[in-house]
Every structure is written in C-alpha cells, then in structure tokens.
Amino acid sequence: MTVFNEIKKEIMAEPMNASYTDRGIEPLYKASKEAKIAIIGQAPGRKAEETQMFWNDPSGDRLRKWMGISRETFYETQVIAHLPMDFYYPGKAKTGDIPPRKGFAEIWHPMILEEMPQLETIILVGSHAQKYYLGKTRKKTLTETVKHYQEYLPDYLPLVHPSPLNHGWLNKNPWFEEDVVPALRKIVHAHI
C-alpha cells in the first residue's frame, strides 16, 4: 500500500470528515511521486464530488483550455497533482459554493506535499489557495496578485478561478489571457 493510500485512510477516519465517510464519499484529490505540478483550488464542486472527478465541470473545461491540454492528459498524467483546499464538497452558498473548511489544508497538505519530492510549481487557483500559500506576500487584491504572477515563480503561479462566474473579470482584464495563460502553458508543457 502506498503512502498516499495510507493518508487517504487517515483523512477518511478523521472525525471532521465523518459525515462524508459515513455517506461513502471519498476525499477528492490526486497525488503521485512523479508530480511536477500541483493544482491547488478551492474545493470540489457538487458535480465533481458526484462523479469523483476533480474539475469535472465548466470551470475545469476552461482550466484545461488555459493549460493547453486535453481532458485525457489532465486526468491520466501522473505529472499533475490536484490538491484542493478541502477534499470534499462544502455545499452551496448564495453565490457559488461555501468556502473550504478552515484547518483542512493545514492538516493534510503538508504531509501530501512532502511525498512529492519532484514538485516544481504549485498553481494557486483563486483567493483561498493564494491566501494560504502566499500569506503576506500576496497583494491587496486577487487581481493584483495574479497580475504580478512573475514575483511568485517558479514556486507558485497564482490564477483567477476559471469559473464561468468570472467571465466579467476576464473581459475587464485582457492581460490575463495575453500574459498569464502563456506562462501557465509554458510551465505545463515543460513537463507534459
């Protein structure tokens, strides 16, 4: 049994996750010793949890388009790890989903990341991941943090969330698809 399987068992046995485990819902993440890139987003959506496939929604379609890779490559490669800030769907809020639970990433991310020694770049999708991983080095707004992405390379690459709800943001910030998306593709295609 791999270390990742052991960690998965621990996650499922953790009391804070009992309501999910009792319903037969497994934590949704992917890690491997071969990973060079980790995508850290918010938390799985309802559809992702139902299908047990992370980024299995329109947000995932846009993320894969930004990365310049196929759906098959996205799911099948061992080079890309997927570690949301919470491995379970937190539920629906008034707009979008409830944020990931506080304290979840603090417990599980360090032990999983430690088992991925070849990791070169962590892609931080959205404000929750950026707040946790960039801390005081992030800018006052998500827009400014993403705009200054080069300051965080090669360890981190901050991105706006690819949600269809961010269509307006993308229209107002054309520099994202002109500058940041090509940088993302360069990182991805260096390993795929």
Image (spheres, rainbow, N blue to C red):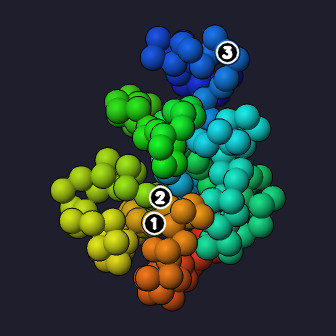
Determine which residue is flagged by label 2: 125
Residue 73 image position (x, y, % from top left): 76, 61
Among numbered discs 2 and 1, the one appearing first in the sequence:
2
Query: Left or right of 109: which side holds 66?
Result: right
Pick whichever, 1 or 17, lies toward us: 17
Quadrant showing the N terminus: top right
Determine which residue is flagged by label 3: 23
Residue 152 image position (x, y, % from top left): 33, 68
At 50% from the left and 61% from the top, the residue drawn is 161
C-alpha separation, residue under disc 1 versus residue under disc 3: 32 Å
Pick whichever, 185 or 129, lies toward us: 129
C-alpha separation, residue under disc 2 versus residue under disc 3: 28 Å
Determine which residue is flagged by label 1: 160
Residue 110 image position (x, y, % from top left): 39, 37
Among numbered discs 2 and 3, the one appearing first in the sequence:
3
At 63% from the left and 11% from the top, the residue drawn is 22
**Crowdedness near tag 1: few (<14), some (14–19) or many (≥20) residues, C-alpha within 10 Å:** many
Query: Left or right of 175: which side holds 87?
Result: right
**Crowdedness near tag 3: few (<14), some (14–19) or many (≥20) residues, C-alpha within 10 Å:** few
Label tally: 3
Pick whichever, 177 or 31, lies toward us: 177
Which residue sits furthest right? 72
Pointers 2 and 1 in contact (C-beta within 8 Å): yes
Which residue sits furthest front? 94
For residue 189, above or below residue 4: below
Q: Secondary structure at mark 1?
A: loop
Q: Quadrant of residue 27?
A: top right
Residue 101 image position (x, y, % from top left): 41, 32
* Mark whose residue sits in front, 2 or 3: 3
